[in-house]
Amino acid sequence: MIPRPARSSELTIAEAGAWADVLVRRRLLHAAVLAPNGQWLVQDQPDEPVRVLTGPADVVELAATIQHRIRSTRPESR
């Protein structure tokens, strides 16, 4: 796996919100809500417990994990 280059700036709430929106819209997460204290409340499925993510970096890391899982489980089309 090719390592990702280091970011030159901190992740923003807007970036995390964009990723959260995509994950919910694509039904890869049931819900993702920004709490007033900057934490994110996420739920994978309606009947599963809510998880607390501490900030934008955790949301983006979750998106990367989901992408990796999708890519590693789908058959190669080549």
Image (tube, rainbow, N blue to C red):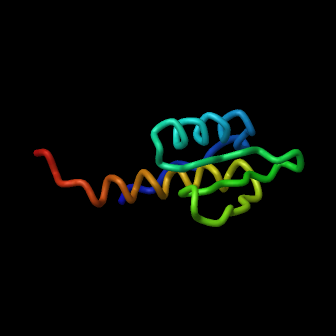
* Picture residue at 49% right of the left edge, 51% below the top: 4
**Outermost residue toward the front in this view:** 47
Residue 23 location (% of width, % of height): 52, 43
* Picture residue at 58% right of the left edge, 39% below the top: 19
Residue 40 location (% of width, % of height): 74, 51
* Res. 17 image quadrant: top right
**Outermost residue toward the bottom in this view:** 49
28 on left or right of 52: left
* Picture residue at 47% right of the left edge, 48% below the top: 28
8 on left or right of 62: right
Residue 56 location (% of width, % of height): 71, 48
* Res. 18 image quadrant: top right
Image quadrant holding the N terminus, namely bottom left
Total tally of numbered discs in the picture: 0
Image quadrant holding the C terminus, namely top left
Q: As rendered, which of 47 and 69 lies closer to the eye?
A: 47
37 on left or right of 50: right
Q: As rendered, which of 2 and 66 lies closer to the eye?
A: 66
* Picture residue at 72% right of the left edge, 45% below the top: 33
Residue 16 location (% of width, % of height): 66, 41
The image shows residue 19, relative to residue 1, as above or below, that is above
The image shows residue 12, relative to residue 1, as above or below, that is above
Q: As rendered, which of 27 and 56 lies closer to the eye?
A: 27
